[in-house]
């Protein structure tokens, strides 16, 4: 288990989910993108919760180890989603402003409407 701190909230979740949240946040930030991810956690009061994290540039998130012996919440779906999205970020097409990848017809139409 790991202790997550996000803004002013403290939650417990599994090691894989916590580490991947940090890794995915860094990947999104490097691409100047954002996403939301729902993660099963244990709240400060011991209740099971589903937390929705807004991840991206400037997301205030950290994870630290804990000595909790509670069973880790099942986050297999969230882990699969973040891995899939991280793969798409690193292998997806990169398009920049003024790039020919946008298509010259699109750029010409855009220039004519200004």
Image (cartoon, rainbow, N blue to C red):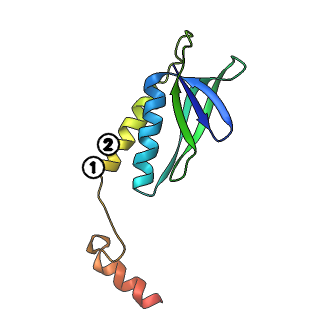
User: Which numbered marker is on residue 102?
Assistant: none
Residues marked 2 and 1 touching at CB (< 8 Å): yes
| 103 vs 89: above or below | below
| Picture coordinates of residue 16, whole percent (x, y) | 43, 25
Q: Nearer the viewer, residue 93 or 53?
A: 53
Along the horizontal axis of the image, is 48 left or right of 58? Answer: right
At 33% from the left and 46% from the top, the residue drawn is 88
At 48% from the left and 89% from the top, the residue drawn is 114
The residue that label 2 is drawn on is: 87
| Picture coordinates of residue 108, whole percent (x, y) | 35, 85
Along the horizontal axis of the image, is 45 left or right of 52? Answer: right
User: Which numbered marker is on residue 91?
Assistant: 1
| 7 vs 41: above or below | below
| 38 vs 88: above or below | above
Q: Secondary structure under badge 2?
A: helix
Few, some or many residues within 10 Å of mark 1 (<14, 14–19, 20+): few
Q: Nearer the viewer, residue 40 or 19?
A: 19
At 48% from the left and 29% from the top, the residue drawn is 18
Residue 24, quarter of the rendered image: top left
Task: Tell me how far mark 2 sits from mark 1, CA to CA.
Answer: 6 Å
């Amino acid at each position: 288990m790991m202790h997550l701190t996000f803004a002013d909230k403290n939650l417990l979740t599994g090691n894989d989910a916590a580490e991947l949240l940090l890794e995915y946040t860094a990947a999104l930030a490097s691409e100047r993108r954002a996403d939301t991810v729902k993660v099963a956690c244990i709240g400060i009061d011991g209740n099971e919760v589903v937390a929705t994290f807004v991840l991206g540039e400037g997301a205030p998130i950290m994870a630290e180890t804990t000595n909790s012996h509670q069973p880790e919440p099942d986050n297999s779906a969230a882990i699969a989603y973040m891995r899939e999205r991280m793969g798409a970020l690193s292998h997806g097409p990169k398009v920049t402003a003024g790039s020919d990848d946008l298509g010259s017809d699109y750029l010409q139409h855009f220039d004519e409407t200004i």
